[in-house]
């Protein structure tokens, strides 16, 4: 777009005379602004909303003090929900060019449910991996409805 604007400005030096040269100073453009990023409260801080990551229609979000995602890396989606009368817990995991994700319920007590997200990455080797990450919805089954229990999300990375 800058090239078109420069050409459209009559930028020919053919009619310039000595002492009357056209300026060739670089042009600057004002920085673009975007709409403010929304944040969702999470134990241990707030995290920007991730585009395309949302609670499915008909599900109930798990938020506030009922969600502890402080062990996840910054920028990781912290969108969690319950479905099927509270007996199915949903969330997002990451998948990429050379890694996959799965999840297990590591612990269920009267006060909390610990969900371990596991990323399986290739071992050390000399092969190229495409650089992309996408977020896939995942679910785990609870032995009884979530009710007032706290959901604790953890991440384990397994190589090899």
Image (cartoon, rainbow, N blue to C red):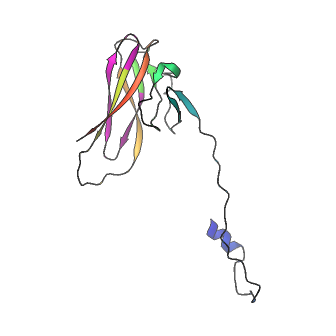
* Residue 144: % across, % down: 37, 11
Q: Does the segment drawn in magenta span residue 133?
A: no
Q: Which residue is drawn at 76% across and 87% down?
A: 19
Q: Which residue lies furthest to the front in this view?
A: 44
User: How many marks do you count on the picture?
Assistant: 0
> Taking 155 as reference, is 147 above or below it?
above
The N terminus lies in which quarter of the figure? bottom right
Q: Quadrant of residue 71?
A: top left
Q: Nearer the viewer, residue 78 or 70?
A: 70
Q: Nearer the viewer, residue 130 or 68?
A: 68
Q: Does the segment drawn in magenta span residue 94?
A: yes
Q: Which residue lies furthest to the bottom in this view?
A: 18
* Residue 126: % across, % down: 24, 55
* Magenta stretch in the rendered image: 91-113
Q: In which quarter of the image is residue 82?
A: top left
* Residue 125: % across, % down: 23, 51
Q: Residue at x 59, y 35 (%)?
A: 38
> Taking 4 as reference, is 54 above or below it?
above
Q: Residue at x 45, y 29 (%)?
A: 70
* Residue 29: % across, % down: 67, 61
> Taking 94 as reference, is 9 above or below it?
below
- What secondary structure is the magenta-colored segment mainly? strand
Q: Which residue is drawn at 38% across and 51% down?
A: 131
The C terminus lies in which quarter of the figure? top left
């Amino acid at each position: 777009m800058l090239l078109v604007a420069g050409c459209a400005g009559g930028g020919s030096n053919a009619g310039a005379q000595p002492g009357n040269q056209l300026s060739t100073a670089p042009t600057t453009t004002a920085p673009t602004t975007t709409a403010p990023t929304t944040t969702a409260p999470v134990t241990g801080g707030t995290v920007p909303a991730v585009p395309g990551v949302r609670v499915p229609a008909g599900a109930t979000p798990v938020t506030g003090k009922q969600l502890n995602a402080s062990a996840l890396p910054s920028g990781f989606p912290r969108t969690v929900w319950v479905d099927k009368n509270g007996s199915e817990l949903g969330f997002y995991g990451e998948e990429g060019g050379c890694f996959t994700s799965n999840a297990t319920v590591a612990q269920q007590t009267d006060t909390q449910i610990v969900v371990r997200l596991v990323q399986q990455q290739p071992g050390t080797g000399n092969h190229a991996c495409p650089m992309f990450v996408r977020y896939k919805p995942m679910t785990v089954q609870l032995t009884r409805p979530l009710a007032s229990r706290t959901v604790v999300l953890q991440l384990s990375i397994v190589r090899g």
